[in-house]
């Protein structure tokens, strides 16, 4: 088995909920009704998905599970603890990619926070192709979220895609 694939699960542990903190970039929002549904799901099915955290105890995925675990009766039933697995990325971009891909695989994101994420990744020098690959987006989606003009975006794409001449690239769009 590939160690990278099974390693996060091998770190499974129950930790005090109070030791964990949310990240500051999660674009996913859940209605109060769906939070109640999540709580009911945990009560009915047990805890089936651990919270994914960084080594510094910041949430990558599982903010809403962490939230409902702080409410009764779950808090008492879990004795203030939640199950976690630890994932270590080399940089903040890896953490953001982890949050977004976990969430996108399950649902939708709000436009404003997604724009902020794309802008931050681009400001960190991440390429349109990398952002697209890591977040499951086509270049057009990255463009719509980037707030760059079409001309500036095309210049970035041409600069980052050394495999095509300018004429070849423009005909592909």
Image: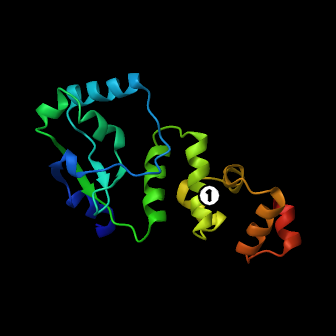
Q: Secondary structure at mark 1?
A: helix
34 lies above or below 119: above
Q: Quadrant of the N terminus?
A: bottom left
- In which quadrant of the rendered view does residue 66 lie? top left
Total numbered labels placed on residues in the image: 1
Is there any visible trace of residue 90 in the rendered image? Answer: yes
Per the image, the residue denoted by label 1 is: 119
Above or below for 7 versus 104: below
What colour scheme governs how the chains and residues are painted in the rendered image of this protein?
rainbow
23, 38: nearer the viewer = 23
What is the x, y in percent for residue 143?
71, 54
Residue at 28% across / 43% down in the picture? 49
- Residue 8 in which image quadrant: bottom left
Q: Quadrant of residue 12?
A: bottom left
Q: As drawn, is 7 to the left or to the right of 121? A: left
Between 76 and 6, the residue placed more toward the observer is: 76
Residue 149 location in percent, x, y? 80, 56
The location of residue 79, given as percent across then percent down, is 10, 38
Residue 2 appearing in the image: no
Residue under the image location 84 percent in, 61 percent down: 151
171 and 42: which one is in front? 42
Q: Residue at x 85, y 72 (%)?
A: 166
The x and y percentages for residue 37 are: 34, 24
Graded by Cα atoms within 10 Å as few (under 14), some (14 to 19) or many (20 or more), the crowding at tag 1 reads some
Task: Give the quadrant of the C terminus.
Answer: bottom right
Residue at coordinates 85% horizontally, 64% vertically from top-left? 170
């Amino acid at each position: 088995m590939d160690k990278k694939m099974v390693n996060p699960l091998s770190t499974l542990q129950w930790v005090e909920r109070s030791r964990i903190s949310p990240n500051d970039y999660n674009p996913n929002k859940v209605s109060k009704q769906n939070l109640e549904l999540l709580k009911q799901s945990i009560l009915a099915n047990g805890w089936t998905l651990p919270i994914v955290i960084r080594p510094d105890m910041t949430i990558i995925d599982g903010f809403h599970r962490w939230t409902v675990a702080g409410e009764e009766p779950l808090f008492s039933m879990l004795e203030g603890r939640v199950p976690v697995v630890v994932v270590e990325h080399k940089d903040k971009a890896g953490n953001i990619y982890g949050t977004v891909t976990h969430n996108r695989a399950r649902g939708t994101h709000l436009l404003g926070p997604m724009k902020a994420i794309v802008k931050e990744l681009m400001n960190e020098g991440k390429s349109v192709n990398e952002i697209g690959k890591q977040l499951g987006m086509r270049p057009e989606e990255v463009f719509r979220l980037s707030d760059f003009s079409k001309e500036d975006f095309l210049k970035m794409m041409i600069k980052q895609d050394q495999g095509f001449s300018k004429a070849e690239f423009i005909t592909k769009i």
